[in-house]
Amino acid sequence: MVVETPARKLDRKEVEQLVREVLRQKLRGEMGPPVREQHAAQATGTGGPPHPLVVNVSARHLHITPGDLETLFGPGAKLAKMKDLYQQDEFASEQLVTLVGPRQRIIPNVRILGPVRQYTQVELSYTDGIYLGVDLPLRISGDHKETGGITILGPKGALSLTGGVVRAQRHVHMSSEDMNWYGVADGDFVKLKIDGPCGVVFDGVKVRYHPKVVLEVHIDTDEGNACDLETATHMELIVDKKGTSHA
Amino acid sequence: MVVETPARKLDRKEVEQLVREVLRQKLRGEMGPPVREQHAAQATGTGGPPHPLVVNVSARHLHITPGDLETLFGPGAKLAKMKDLYQQDEFASEQLVTLVGPRQRIIPNVRILGPVRQYTQVELSYTDGIYLGVDLPLRISGDHKETGGITILGPKGALSLTGGVVRAQRHVHMSSEDMNWYGVADGDFVKLKIDGPCGVVFDGVKVRYHPKVVLEVHIDTDEGNACDLETATHMELIVDKKGTSHA
C-alpha cells in the first residue's frame, strides 16, 4: 500500500476542483450516489433453526488499518462509534471519507466500519464501480489478490490504495450451531430465497464460520435493490444437498 | 400531465444552480450515476426454443409523447435515431434530458427511447430512485396508476410530470411461437435463471405478448448488476407448471 498526496497523481487544478466539488456537495446536503441500508429478519418457528435468518444490505463502506486511519484523520485518530452493527463488537463509525476514481469522479461520505483491521479494504457495488470507473473483483473479505486501488481523501490527508477495492461476495455468517443445523461447513455455498414482488434466489452465498457470530446474510445494494428486500414477504436459506450451488 | 416551467416550483437561484450543475457535469464529461447497457444471448440448441434467449439490461430511460418532446426540444422536434434496439422499430434516440428529483438532485443525460409513445414514462432503477428521492412503483409499461412525477429539463424547455415514473417490472417479450414453446400465456410469470459467479434466479418475470416481438427478457441495472450478467455462464427461462411463480 502506497500512501501519497493526491497531488502526485492529480494536478493542482484538478485537486482544487475535487475539493470544491466535495464542499459543494456537502453544503447542498448531497451524498453522492445512493446508499440503502436495510435489515430484514425472519422469525424462527418451533423446531426451526437456532437463530432467526437475518439479511442485511451492506451499503458501500471501508475497513481500515490504524496507520491508514491516521493518514486520513491525523495522528492519534481513533474510530468513533456511531452505532453498533448486528455482529458483536462491529460498528459503524462516525468517520466518513471521499473516494476518487480514475475518471475523476467522486463518491463522498463513505463510512468506515470498525473496529480497525489489519488491512484497508473498500467494498463497493458494481453500480458504484461503473460510476467511478474501477473494476471490482468479487472477493471474500481480506482476499486482495489481483484487486485494484483507489484514492481516498480524508479531512487530514489522502492515500492511494494499490489494492483492496472489491465487490464483497455474498455470504452468510454462521457459528457451529448454525452450520450444524443447516448441515454445511465453512466455505460451502448455500442459496438465499427472497419472496416478494421482486423475488429472487441468490445462488453462491458463501458460508463464513466464526465461533462468535450470529446468523446473518450480507448482500450489497445492487442485490438488495434487485430483490427489493424492503418488500420481502418470506426469506429462507436453501442448502443444495447434491453439492454446492456455486457456478 | 401538467407542463410548466421549473420556475413555478423552484426559485430563480435554484434553477440557476441546477443549470450550472448540468453544464459543469457536461463539461467535465460526467454522466451522473452509472449506466450499464448489456446484451447477453444464449444460443438455441437442436430441438430448443424457436428463438435464442436474449437478456437485455435496460439502463434508465424514458418514453415520450410528441407533445412533451416539443416542450423539451422545441416546436417540431422529432426523435433522431442513434441506434436500433433489439425489437424491430424500437430505437435509442440521440436526445438526452436531465431529471430533477424532489431533493434537488439531478441525473443528466437520460436517453429517450423511440418511437414516440402515447404516454411519457420514466423508467429508473431503485438505486436511481433512492438517489433522486422518488418512490418507484413496480409497473408494466403504460400502467401509471398511483405513480409519481418528476421534473424533466430539455434544451428548450422543462416539464413536470405528475405521474409515470416507475421501476419497470422484469418481463419477457414473447410472440405466439415463443409462448407455445414455453407453454405460457400473456400475463403469466416465469423465472429467469442466470448461472455464474453472481448467479441469481429472478422470480416473477412477466410474459408480455406482442405478435411482432422476438424473445427478449428485460431487467434493470440493479438486477443486471446483482447477477453480473456480463459474466453469466448459462441462462434459461424456467416455467413453473404448478402455477405462477410470482408472489
Image (cartoon, coloured by chain):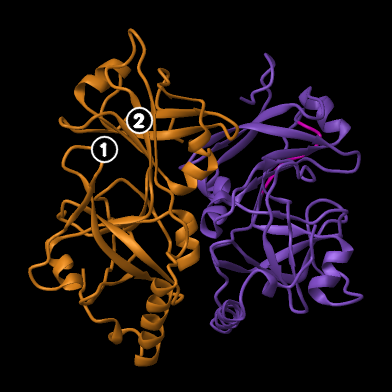
Chain colours: A purple, B orange
Which amino acid, by three-letter code, is at mark 2? Val
- Quarter location, residue B204: top left
Q: Position of residue A135 (x, y in %)?
A: 59, 48
Q: Is residue A80 visible?
A: no
Q: Which mark is first along the chain, 2 or 1?
A: 2
* Whether label 1 touches label 2, CB < 8 Å: yes
Q: Is residue A51 visible?
A: yes
Q: Is residue B6 above or below residue A220?
A: below
Q: Position of residue A146 (x, y in %)?
A: 71, 42
Say which mark, if any, is on residue B54. Answer: 2
Q: Position of residue B207 (x, y in %)?
A: 31, 32
Which residue lies at the image location 64% right of the left edge and 43% below the top edge? A137
Mark 1 belongs to chain: B
Which residue lies at the image location 84% right of the left edge and 25% below the top edge? A180
Give the residues in magenta.
A49-56
Which amino acid, by three-letter code, is at mark 1? Tyr
The quarter of the image holding the C terminus of chain A is top right
Say which mark, if any, is on residue B86. Answer: 1
Q: Is residue B6 magenta?
A: no
Do discs 1 and 2 share a chain?
yes
- Quarter location, residue B66: bottom left
Measured Cα–Cα span from mark 1 to mark 2: 9 Å
What SS does tag 2 mark? strand
Pointer 1 local density, CA inside 10 Å: few below 14, some 14–19, many at least 20: some
